[in-house]
Amino acid sequence: MKTLKELREESKGQTRMLWHSNFWDCPLSGVILWNGQKAWFDKVDERTDIEPWSEEEIKDWLEYESSKDDKDKLAEDEYFHYDTHFIYKVYRVHPDFMEHLEDNHRDFQDNVGTHCDYDENGNRHHNLKPYELHGNYYKKDKKVNVCYPPLDKSDSNVIGEFEY
């Protein structure tokens, strides 16, 4: 499976994260540009690669620890690198629903900030609006209007997947 960075480079920026709607240690869901078309993404799984430290890394750690007054004792089974990969599915979204998502996101940007947005290189923005404005967004009823079709996550609407 390809990473989002690989897909972004291959597509010359036509596949990239636009914004996340939910975040917990990584983006959980949001809107992505997928081959030039806006779509929804959801985290569906994660995989952790475990690789043991090299002998040199263990030696360096033990040397570093021996120089400290407050020593962190690691058991031999803790000398590992953990590299977590997050797996996402990308879903086709009805145009009316995407319009609703975009309107809601613009309102979020205006009142809360653009800290959930990503630039064309995959870097996250860090612009948060003053706290006094946040209530303008959060006090509104954000329920999806019944005139918008719900997000259909059936396999027939999966248009891709990626790793982040």
Image (cartoon, rainbow, N blue to C red):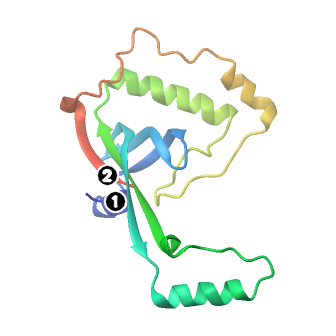
- Residue at image position (31%, 42%) is 89
User: Label 1: which residue?
Assistant: 3
Residue 107 shows up from this direction: yes
Q: Which residue corresponds to mark 2?
A: 162
The residue positioned farthest toward the left in the image shown: 156
Name the residue type under label 2.
Answer: Phe
Residue at figure coordinates x 42%, y 76% from the top left? 52
Q: x and y percent of residue 40 in the render? A: 37, 36
**In the rendered image of this protein, does residue 79 appear above or below residue 10?**
below
In what element is the residue under mark 1?
loop
- Residue 47, picture quadrant: bottom left
In the rendered structure, the answer to whether residue 77 lies left or right of residue 47 reads right
104 with respect to 17 (left or right): right
Q: Are marks 2 and 1 in contact (CB under 8 Å)?
A: yes
- Quarter of the image for the N terminus: give it: bottom left
From the top left corner, tell me how far across and down residue 29 is, in percent.
44, 38
Q: Nearer the viewer, residue 2 or 14?
A: 2
Any part of residue 35 in sight: no
Q: Residue at x 69, y 18 (%)?
A: 139
Figure check: 134 above or below 60: above
Query: CA–CA distance between discs 2 and 1?
Result: 5 Å
- The total of numbered circles placed on residues is 2
Circle 2 packing at 10 Å, graded few (<14), some (14-19), many (20+), is some
Q: Position of residue 80 (x, y in %)?
A: 47, 72
Mark 1, Cα crowd under 10 Å, few <14 / some 14-19 / many 20+, is: some
Specify the quadrant that holds the C terminus: bottom left
- Secondary structure beneath disc 2? strand
The circle on residue 22 is: none
The three-letter code of the residue at mark 1 reads Thr
| Image coordinates for residue 125, horizontal then vertical, percent | 60, 52
